[in-house]
Image: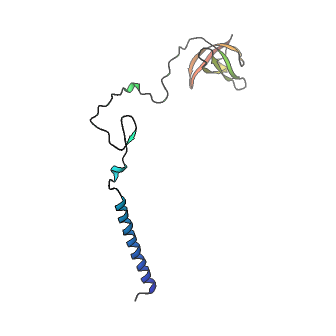
Amino acid sequence: MATFEKREKEKKRLQNQEEKKRRKEARKANSSGGGLENMMAYLDENGQITSTPPDPNKVRKPIDASEIEIGVPKRIDVPVAAERLGRVDFFDTSKGFGFIKEDITQERFFVHISGLLDEVGENDKVQFEIERGQKGMNAVRVKKI
């Protein structure tokens, strides 16, 4: 003998099943049928996104691997022993380091107190050489002019 509550639960369960079937059929009817093919995107030879796959018969341009630059471009080696002229841009005597700005290229070089031959201050005209340090080119053998 089924109670009223059990009959109501059974009705609700059947209604939910029928609703689920209707939604499934509606999704099938609304889908265009392509599946994965409709979701695919391709790149053409100019790097633009398109919906058509590339033509495998087209002639590909040869690529020279030596022309590809990844990261920082190659730096031209500077002659190490060349004497340069510049001006002390900044120098902190308490910390023992500063920067020298070269007159010709306007490039800034790090200088440590250990690389000084004379005592220098800001805006002093100096003559120096450069050497490769751990983090780049450093000014060494710095003389006040």
Please provide percent x and percent y for residue 92.
71, 24
Q: Is residue 35 left or right of residue 8?
A: left
Residue 71 lies left or right of residue 24; in this view the side is right
- Image quarter in which the C terminus is found: top right
Instruction: Give left or right: position of 11 versus 103.
Output: left
Quarter holding residue 109: top right
The image quadrant of residue 58 is top left
Quadrant position of residue 98: top right
Q: Residue furthest left?
A: 57
Residue drawn at (49%, 28%) of the image: 72
The answer to whether 92 is drawn above or below residue 82 in the figure is: below
Viewer-nearest residue: 129 or 43: 43
Please state the horizontal and vertical placement of residue 54, each as a whole percent of the image: 32, 39
Q: How many marks?
A: 0
Residue 123 vertical position relative to residue 43 in the rendered view, above or below = above
Furthest toward the bottom, the residue is 1
Q: Residue at x 71, y 17 (%)?
A: 123
Percent across and percent down for residue 32 are: 34, 56
Kindly identify the residue that appears in the image at 34 percent across and 61 percent down: 29
Residue 13 at x, y percent in the picture: 41, 76
* Structure colour scheme: rainbow
Image point (37%, 68%), residue name? 22
- Quadrant in which the N terminus is drawn: bottom left
Instruction: Say which of 68 and 82 sits in front.
Output: 68
